[in-house]
Every structure is written in structure tokens, then in C-alpha cells.
Image: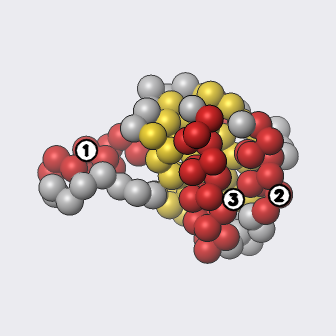
Amino acid sequence: MLAQLTQLVKDVDGAWAAAIGGMDGLLVEGHATTETDLSLLVAEHAGLLQAAATVYSHSLNVGTPRELYLRGERLSVYLHPITPGYFLLLAVDARSNLGQARLYGRDAARKLEAML
């Protein structure tokens, strides 16, 4: 799994971290090119993904989210569910390419699903 995450960071322009997180907020595996707390990123984003899933599936009745992209002032994150219990997190900087993040992220999620 680490090889898939490392390759994902290399393939996406502006990517600096990739991780597999559990919906329980625990880090399963991760790779970063900078000093960062991947456990904290996974824990916080698991809550956001769970909240989005609740709103989409229960409040709006439109199904579960297939991906979530959050763009902040200093941090942008692309989230892609892998299985009901796990998700892919890809952290990118301001020069990131969202199209690449989505394309390579979906591909990585499919490959990781077979490993989980």
C-alpha cells in the first residue's frame, strides 16, 4: 500500500502527502514529502467525510458521496472513499492540479481496495 501512496504523490502535481484512513479516524498507511502529522489529517478529515455522508445519504437522500475536495488557504485535500470503512486522502498545495488528483486518486483507490 505504501508503494501506491508514494507513487500517487509523485504522479499528482503539487501533491505532498497521501494516506489511507479508516472511517474511525485512524491512520492505516501514509506517505508525505514534508514533516506533517498524517494521523491528525486523517482523524480530522474522517469526521468531515462522515458528516458529508450523513448529510448526503440521510438528510438529502441522494446517496453517499463519491469524493470530497476541500480547498483551504494553506491546505487542500482530496478525499475518495475506498470501501465503506476506508478512504484515500491526498493533500495538495496551491499549484495542485485537481484533475490529476481526481484521475490518479480514483485509480489508486481501486488498486488499494483490492489490498484492503
Residue 66 visible in image: yes
Image coords of residue 81 (percent x, y): 47, 47
Q: Residue at x 74, y 46 (%)?
A: 4
Q: Nearer the viewer, mark 3 or mark 2?
A: 2
55 left or right of 101 in image: left
- The crowding category of the residue bearing disc 1, from other C-alpha atoms within 10 Å (few below 14, some 14 to 19, many at least 20), is some
- Identify the residue position indicated by label 3 in the image: 92
- In which quadrant will I find the N terminus? top right
Task: Give amino acid for label 3.
Answer: Val
What count of labels does the image hold? 3
- Identify the residue position indicated by label 2 in the image: 10
Image coords of residue 96 (percent x, y): 70, 69
Between 66 and 76, the one lying in front of the other is 66
Task: Give amino acid for label 2.
Answer: Lys
- The crowding category of the residue bearing disc 3, from other C-alpha atoms within 10 Å (few below 14, some 14 to 19, many at least 20), is many
- Identify the residue position indicated by label 1 in the image: 54
Q: CA distance from mark 1 to mark 3?
A: 26 Å
Which secondary structure lies at badge 2? helix
Which label's residue is closer to the chain start, 3 or 2? 2
Image coords of residue 107 (percent x, y): 62, 58
Q: CA distance from mark 1 to mark 2?
A: 33 Å
